[in-house]
Image (cartoon, rainbow, N blue to C red):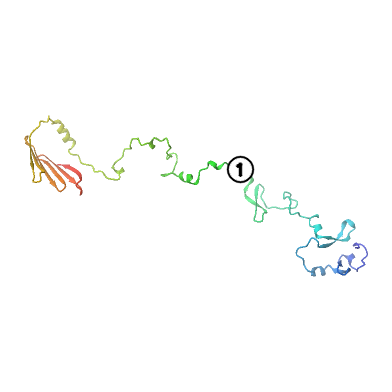
Amino acid sequence: MPGRSGANPYGAGEGTNNHVLLLNKGTKTHGQLDVGTDIHALSLKAVPANDDEIAIDDSADSYNRKKVKVSSISGTGEYYHDRLHAISSTSDHSSVATPGRMLKADANGLPAQATNTDTEVSDAVSKKHDSTNDPTTGQKAALVGTSGTPGYTNKYVTNNDPRNTNSRTPASHGNEAHSSAFTTLPLVKADTDIADAIAKKHAHVPSNMDITRDGDGNITQMDFDDERQYTITRNAYGIDHVTLVGETTWTITRDGNGVITGIVVT
């Protein structure tokens, strides 16, 4: 095939670089293709095949016209960009990543800037530990304690705490600590009466006593030979009054079940 500087046996125009000579493979004839209009009018092939041919001017052979296959230029050439290659060089790559930041893969597997810095990741790796002895979820929940916030003034009870044994002195408490109320009985006599009784105490001398009963055999009166006389009255539940005639009366109160709830001395 003649070079660009040689004579054009197929027609005029090659010397002005505005025409390209094409070989009609079907007829082995040559025709002219107007670069300005005819190439643009050709059908478009989206993806070239390896065996497709392209016309070139060979710079290594005085720019003689030659053809090459797509397969021979897909992996070579000054501006060829290999799909698999290192990205450490800035000669054929640009990046918006911040220096010192970690990179992660995006949805397409391409590098994207991560949130953490290299220093932060290195620090986290250096502080990692075996999680074998880490508390379980249930153990962590138990750490909140059962009453109040655990702390220096609200400590956990350990196995050696003496309060874990049954033999311990009960803490002093009042009636409010019990679920049932206990009745506090009034004093039978005032302190001055008790002191007076002690001062006047005397040796007990047995004396005779006469007993009076009602028709049911219940004692209603007791008469001592020292002239002391006691009278006893009853209600449906039992004795409700005991009276030392001329001196003291004991009044007994009961609840609806007949249980004594109090004794009042007058």
The residue that appears at 7% across and 41% down in the rendered structure is 212
Residue 41, picture quadrant: bottom right
Left or right of residue 162, residue 135 in this image? right
The residue that appears at 18% across and 45% down in the rendered structure is 253
- Report crowding for label 1: few under 14, some 14 to 19, many 20 or more residues within 10 A (C-alpha): few
Number of marks: 1
Pinpoint residue 238: horizontal percent, then vertical percent. 15, 45
Pinpoint residue 36: horizontal percent, then vertical percent. 82, 68
The residue that appears at 16% across and 35% down in the rendered structure is 193
Q: Is residue 204 above or below residue 79?
A: above
Q: Is residue 188 above or below residue 10?
A: above
Picture quarter with the C terminus: top left
Residue 63, picture quadrant: bottom right
| Residue denoted by label 1 | 125
Pinpoint residue 117: horizontal percent, then vertical percent. 63, 47
Closer to the camera in the image, 84 or 14 = 84
As drawn, the residue found furthest toward the front would be 216
Q: Is residue 110 above or below residue 221?
A: below
As drawn, the residue found furthest toward the top would be 203
User: Element type at marker 1?
Assistant: helix
The residue that appears at 16% across and 31% down in the rendered structure is 198
Q: Is residue 38 above or below residue 184?
A: below
Q: Amino acid at mark 1?
A: Val
Pinpoint residue 18: horizontal percent, then vertical percent. 86, 66
Left or right of residue 159, residue 78 in this image? right
Picture quarter with the N terminus: bottom right
